[in-house]
C-alpha cells in the first residue's frame, strides 16, 4: 500500500479542512468581518471594493489600516508604507507555519500561493489542528480551510453590507472586541511550546511600552525585541532544567 | 472623508493592500523553507511571531478604533481580566473566556449609555 492511502485521500483532508468553517475560530472571524463591514459601510466605501479587499488583502488589521488611510486621503505610497509596516508580522508567522505543513516534496510555488491565505485566524487554527493531520496531507488540509475561509467571508461581506450600516453602537463595539479577545484565548490554547506563553506575555507588555517610546515602529520593535527576549529567557530556563536533570 | 472611485480604487487596493501584505508572506515562505523543525532558530521565529501578534492584540484593546474609542479604558481592561479569570476557572475553555469578556463589555457599555 502506498503512503498516501494509509493517510486517507487528499480529497478527504481537503474536505476536513473545509469543514473548519464551522469551528469556533471561523465563526468569530466571520463576526469580526461583519464588524469590519459595518465600519466600511458607515464610512461609505463601495461594497465591490470591500469584497475585493477581503480577497486581496485578507489580513483584517491590514485592511483596517488600508481603509483608514484611504479615508484620510493618503496617497498610494503612504498607504502602502502604513500597511506594509503593519504586516511585517506575516513573515515570521508564515515562516513558523511552513516547517509544520510542508514535506520534502512540497513545491515552493504551492507554498507561495497558499501563503496568501495566512492571517491570524488561519495561522492560529492551522498551528493548533495540523498536529492531528498526517504530514503528507497537511498542505491539502490547510488549503481546504484557508480557501474556504476567504471565499466565505467575501460572500458574507457582500451579503451583509446593506444591513450593517445602521448597527447599534453597542453591537458594533462588542463585535470589534471579539477579535483581540479571541486571539488571546486561542494563542494560549494552541501553544505547544513553552516559549509561546512567554512571548505572548512579553508582547502584550512590550506593545504598549514601544507605542509610548516609538509609536511608528511599535509593533515591529515589540515583536523582534520582545520575541527575542522571550526566546532568550525561555531557552535559559530550559537549559538550566536540563543541567539539573 | 475620501472615497476612491473607478478602476483606480482597485489598483490602489492591489498595491497598498495586496502587494503590501503578500510581500511578507512570500518572504516568510522563503525563510520558512530553510528552517528545520525543532531547531532553536524556529523557536526564535515562533517567539517573534507570537510577540508581534500579542503587540497587535494589546493595541486593539488599549487603542481601539470606532465605537470603542469612546469607551473607558478600565472597562476594556476589566472585560479582558474577567474573561481571563473565567477562562482559567473553566479549565481553559475558549468559548467561556470569550463569552465572559464580551458579556462584561456589553453590560458596561449598556450601563454607560452606549
Image (cartoon, coloured by chain):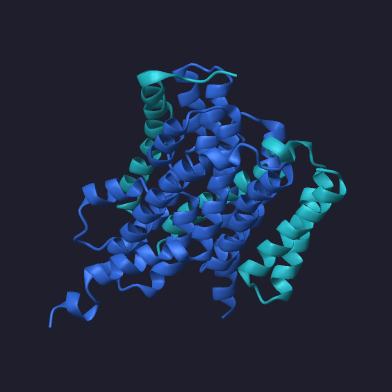
Chain colours: A blue, B cyan
**Residue at (87% x, 50% y) in the render:** B111
**Residue at (52% x, 50% y) in the render:** B48
Q: Quadrant of the C terminus of chain A?
A: bottom right
Instruction: Please state the horizontal and vertical placement of residue B46, each as a whole percent of the image.
Output: 48, 56
Q: Quadrant of the N terminus of chain A?
A: bottom left
Up the image or down, B47 lies above or below A133; here it is above
**Residue at (34% x, 53% y) in the render:** A147
**Residue at (47% x, 44% y) in the render:** A159
Instruction: Please state the horizontal and vertical placement of residue A225, each as a whole percent of the image.
Output: 58, 44
* Left or right of residue B65: residue B41: left
Among the 4 quarters of the image, the one containing residue A9: bottom left
* Left or right of residue A14: residue A213: right
Q: Nearer the viewer, residue B61 or A199?
A: B61
Instruction: Please state the horizontal and vertical placement of residue A90, each as a whole percent of the image.
Output: 45, 44
Instruction: Please state the horizontal and vertical placement of residue A242, each as a whole percent of the image.
Output: 54, 75
Q: Nearer the viewer, residue B42 or B57?
A: B57
Question: Can I make out residue A162 in this image?
Answer: yes
* Left or right of residue A15: residue B111: right
* Left or right of residue A86: residue B87: right
Amino acid at each position: 500500500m502506498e503512503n498516501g492511502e494509509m493517510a486517507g485521500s487528499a480529497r478527504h483532508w481537503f474536505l476536513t479542512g473545509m469543514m473548519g468553517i464551522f469551528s469556533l475560530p471561523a465563526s468569530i472571524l466571520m463576526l469580526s468581518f461583519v464588524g469590519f463591514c459595518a465600519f466600511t459601510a458607515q464610512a461609505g466605501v463601495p461594497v465591490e471594493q470591500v469584497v475585493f479587499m477581503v480577497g486581496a488583502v485578507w489580513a483584517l488589521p491590514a485592511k483596517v489600516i488600508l481603509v483608514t488611510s484611504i479615508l484620510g486621503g493618503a496617497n498610494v505610497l503612504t498607504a502602502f508604507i502604513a500597511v506594509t509596516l503593519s504586516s511585517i508580522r506575516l513573515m515570521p508567522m508564515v515562516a513558523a507555519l511552513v516547517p509544520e505543513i510542508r514535506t520534502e516534496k512540497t513545491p515552493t510555488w504551492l507554498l507561495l500561493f497558499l501563503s496568501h491565505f495566512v492571517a491570524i485566524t488561519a495561522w492560529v487554527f492551522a498551528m493548533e489542528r495540523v498536529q492531528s493531520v498526517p504530514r503528507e496531507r497537511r498542505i491539502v488540509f490547510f488549503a481546504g480551510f484557508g480557501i474556504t475561509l476567504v471565499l466565505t467571508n467575501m460572500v458574507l461581506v457582500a451579503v451583509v453590507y446593506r444591513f450593517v450600516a445602521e448597527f447599534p453602537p453597542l453591537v458594533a463595539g462588542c463585535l470589534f472586541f471579539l477579535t483581540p479577545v479571541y486571539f488571546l484565548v486561542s494563542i494560549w490554547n494552541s501553544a505547544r511550546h513553552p516559549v509561546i506563553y512567554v512571548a505572548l506575555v512579553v508582547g502584550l507588555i512590550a506593545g504598549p511600552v514601544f507605542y509610548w517610546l516609538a509609536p511608528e515602529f511599535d509593533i515591529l520593535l515589540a515583536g523582534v525585541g520582545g520575541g527575542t527576549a522571550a526566546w532568550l529567557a525561555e531557552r535559559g530556563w530550559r537549559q538550566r532544567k536540563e543541567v539539573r536533570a | 472623508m475620501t472615497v476612491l472611485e473607478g478602476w483606480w480604487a482597485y489598483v490602489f487596493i492591489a498595491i497598498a493592500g495586496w502587494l503590501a501584505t503578500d510581500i511578507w508572506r512570500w518572504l516568510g515562505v522563503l525563510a520558512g523553507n530553510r528552517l528545520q523543525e525543532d531547531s532553536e532558530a524556529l523557536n526564535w521565529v515562533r517567539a517573534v511571531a507570537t510577540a508581534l501578534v500579542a503587540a497587535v492584540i494589546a493595541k486593539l484593546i488599549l487603542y481601539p478604533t470606532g465605537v470603542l474609542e469612546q469607551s473607558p479604558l478600565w472597562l476594556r481592561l476589566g472585560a479582558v481580566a474577567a474573561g481571563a479569570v473565567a477562562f482559567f476557572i473553566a479549565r481553559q475553555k475558549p468559548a467561556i473566556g470569550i463569552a465572559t469578556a464580551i458579556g462584561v463589555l456589553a453590560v458596561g457599555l449598556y450601563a454607560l449609555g452606549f
